[in-house]
Image (spheres, rainbow, N blue to C red):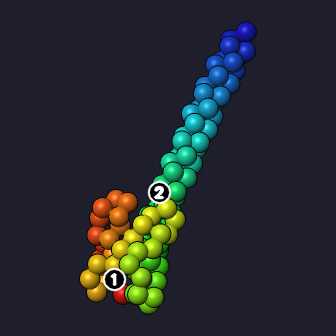
Amino acid sequence: MIVMRRLKGFLLAESMVALILAIMGVSSMALIVSDTRTTERKIELKTDRIYAWRVLKKNNLKSIMVHDQLYELRGEKSIYDISTKETYYIKK
């Protein structure tokens, strides 16, 4: 009788530890995926700016739209994003 009660208590504790580990695994996976998407978006925006700068420079255009962002050439190595009203310096 005492052995069965101890066994049930052990199984309950073991299942709680397993549940805690599973929750930690799922939450860390969600965190990793969300950070990856944020980083991917930043890199995509940076690439779009460099692409827009190069096209504007080579083709002597006033403005260009890349992925729903409107860009204008500002100076020798900078580009102006009309949508966000920010100027970005282009590193070569």
Position of 33 relative to 65 (above/below): above
Which residue occupies the foreground of this view, 32 or 24?
Answer: 32
Marks 1/2: CA distance? 22 Å
Residue 80's disc number = none
Per the image, the residue denoted by label 1 is 91
Residue 21 in view (yes/no)? no
Per the image, the residue denoted by label 2 is 38
Which residue occupies the foreground of this view, 20 or 75?
Answer: 75
Q: Position of residue 70 (x, y in %)?
A: 42, 66
**Residue pictured at 34% horizontal, 78% vertical:** 73
**Residue pictured at 65% horizontal, 22% vertical:** 12
**Residue pictured at 35% horizontal, 64% vertical:** 82
Specify which label sits upstream in the sequence, 1 or 2. Answer: 2
Q: In this view, does 84 lie to the left or right of 41?
A: left
Position of 3 relative to 69 (above/below): above
Which element type, helix, strand or loop, lies under badge 1?
loop
Residue 71 in view (yes/no)? yes
Q: Position of residue 5 (x, y in %)?
A: 68, 13
Q: Is residue 29 left or right of residue 74?
A: right
Position of 2 relative to 80 (above/below): above
Quadrant of residue 27 in the image? top right
Which element type, helix, strand or loop, lies under badge 2?
helix
- Kind of residue sitting beneath label 1: Lys
Which residue occupies the foreground of this view, 72 or 2?
Answer: 72
Q: Is residue 38 left or right of residue 21?
A: left
For disc 1, the neighbor class at 10 Å (few under 14, some 14 to 19, many from 20) is few
Quadrant of residue 76 in the image? bottom left
